[in-house]
Amino acid sequence: MSSSTEPARVLRLGTRRSALAKAQSGAVADLVAKVTGTTVELVEITTYGDTSKEALAQIGGTGVFVSALRDALLAGRIDLAVHSLKDLPTAAPRGLALAAVPPREDPRDVLVARDGLRLAELPDGARVGTGSPRRMAQLNAWALRTGRRLDVVPIRGNVDTRVGFVRSGELDAVVLAHAGLLRLGRAEEVTEVLPFDTMLPAPGQGALAVECSASHADLVTALAELDDPLTRAAVTAERSLLAALEAGCSAPVGAHAVGWGDELPATELRLAAFVGRPDGAAMVQLSATGSLDDASALGRDLAAEMLAQGAAGLMGERDC
Ligand SMILES: NCc1[nH]cc(CCC(=O)O)c1CC(=O)O
């Protein structure tokens, strides 16, 4: 009798309003609907990071994109949230579960330049926009290594705004995450996919995090189906390196882990990492291999080695 009067159970998925956030939330919502057999409704939430025009480092780093969604989860206004893993602070809040890390999109950064130009084809003194100290450090290091001159210009804004600086002629190029452009269906605007030896991505770049309340046991179990163990291990190594470096979220730290060795599925991970001064004149760049089952030890140990080689002095103040 009672079932006919009960409201249909709906899962509320909180999302930021940006085109990128909605694209990735929409894709995850479809997957969640499939594995739970439940309708998933998108709930838009505005974060301070979306409305403020200040530099990220000034307003507390990329964590500003995440905290409003986490507050909504903890208050029970939404059931799950999708974050870009690279924006997720390494400290996990009490009461929330990182229920799934779905298969990763391309983690690399790309160049979007005028006239189809690649990095090595930019003229001397070219104006290249990025607000990321990590990208700035590696662009400047590349210029010093190859004997070129780049004018790295600090910018911020969503994908449209940043690409707009190139379209308007204000900048010669910008550096963005490939994953963002792919998820927006804008892959054809990329003029070069930057190789890892030029540009190590941010820890977690290209991966998503699906969070829900740890007490919502059925949902935690259902979401586990969306988890990709290799992606989870890789981002665990990258994020444990970041945490052990005690770097802020906008610190000049690049890290990338991949499955390693001949076995399939992989039992080992290879982690490469970069810490550099934004002017590109000093850096520590190292890599190491370790067991996939102990990904956090791999990150922690490589961080310790980088700190022993002076990484802390390159990072500046901790900002979040
Ligand atoms: N810094 C903001 C941000 N956070 C996540 C992405 C998209 C890429 C991803 O999901 O890792 C971007 C855009 C960018 O860096 O160009």
Image (cartoon, rainbow, N blue to C red):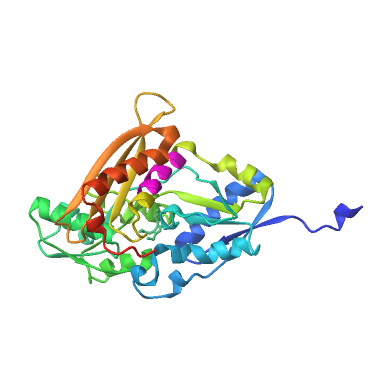
* In the rendered image, the vertical position of residue 224 relative to residue 96, given as above or below: above
The residue depicted at 74 percent of the width and 55 percent of the height is 9
On the image, the x and y values in percent for residue 92 come to: 50, 54
Q: Quadrant of the C terminus?
A: bottom left
On the image, the x and y values in percent for residue 13 come to: 60, 58
The residue depicted at 26 percent of the width and 66 percent of the height is 166
Kindly tell me whether residue 205 is visible in this rendering: no
Q: Main secondary structure of the magenta part?
A: helix
Which residue, as the protein is rendered here, is positioned at the far front? 308
On the image, the x and y values in percent for residue 306 come to: 26, 46
Tell me: 262 left or right of 123: right
Which residue, as the protein is rendered here, is positioned at the far left? 147
* In the rendered image, the vertical position of residue 188 relative to residue 103, given as above or below: below
The stretch of residues the image draws in magenta is: 231-241
Tell me: 67 left or right of 120: right
Foreground residue, 266 or 168?
266
Q: Is residue 236 magenta?
A: yes
Count of marks, rendered view: 0
* In the rendered image, the vertical position of residue 161 relative to residue 100, given as above or below: below
Which residue, as the protein is rendered here, is positioned at the far top? 263
